[in-house]
Every structure is written in structure tokens, then in C-alpha cells.
Image (cartoon, grey):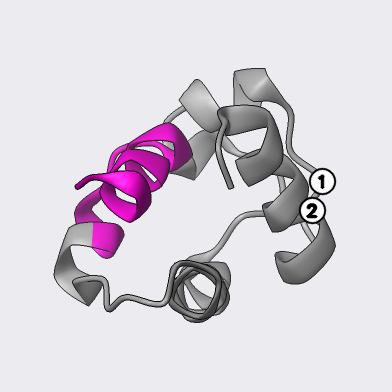
Amino acid sequence: MNSLDEFAELISDHVGIPVTGEDLRRNVDEVPGWDSLHVMWLLTVLERETGRRLSLPDVIEAPTLAHVYELAVAP
């Protein structure tokens, strides 16, 4: 996962919510079909894909999915 496009594809494929680049930059409350259950699925997928643990509170508090991406790929 090296780009926001790949991140959007990961969400669509593994979480089941088709998202666009525009959706990634929206407030998560504005992403069509998104809810708190999807946060847990996304966290699980990201930890599996990156091989590292992510902070659940940080992911929950992320204002956008793009911010979640930054948390996942941050050094």
C-alpha cells in the first residue's frame, strides 16, 4: 500500500465500502455507508497488511480516511 489510490482499493476490496479519492478526504461521518463497524474492519486489515499495530483510539479519532492512511504508513 503505497498510495491513497491503493488505500481506497484496500477499503473497497477488504472492508466492502467503495470509496473514491474524494471520499478519503471527507469527514468520516460524510462517507456514504461508513460506520463504526467499518473502523474495526479497517484496523484489522491495516494491521495485517502493514504488519504493525495501530492505535485504536488514533484510528477512531481520525477525522478522515486519508488521516487513517497517514497513521498506517507513518514511519
Look at mark 1 in the image and give the residue it sits on: 18
Q: Amino acid at mark 2?
A: Ser
Front one among 36 and 71: 71
Q: Position of residue 54 (x, y in %)?
A: 26, 71
Residue hosting label 2: 12
Please state the horizontal and vertical placement of residue 43, each as a whole percent of the image. Answer: 44, 73
Callout 1 secondary element: loop
Say whether residue 56 is magenta: no
The image's mark for residue 52 is none
Query: Going by the image, does 12 lie left or right of 69?
Result: right
Prevailing secondary structure class for the magenta stretch in the rendered image: helix
Q: Tell me, yes or no, whether the two marked residues, 2 and 1, touch with CB atoms within 8 Å.
A: yes
* Left-right relation of 34 to 74: right
Mark 2 neighbour class, 10 Å CA radius: few under 14, some 14 to 19, many 20 or more: some
Query: How many numbered marks appear?
Result: 2
- Residue 44, compared with residue 30, is above or below; it is below
Please identify the residue farthest to the top as the structure is shown: 22
Q: How far across and down, in percent of the image, does residue 14 sit? A: 75, 69
Residue range (magenta): 59-75
| Type of amino acid under label 1 | Pro
Residue 27 spot, x, y in % from top left: 42, 32
Rendered position, 58 above or below 14:
above
Local secondary structure at mark 2: helix
Q: Is 65 included in the stretch rendered in magenta? A: yes
> Disc 2 or 1, which lies upstream in sequence?
2
26 or 45: nearer the viewer:
45
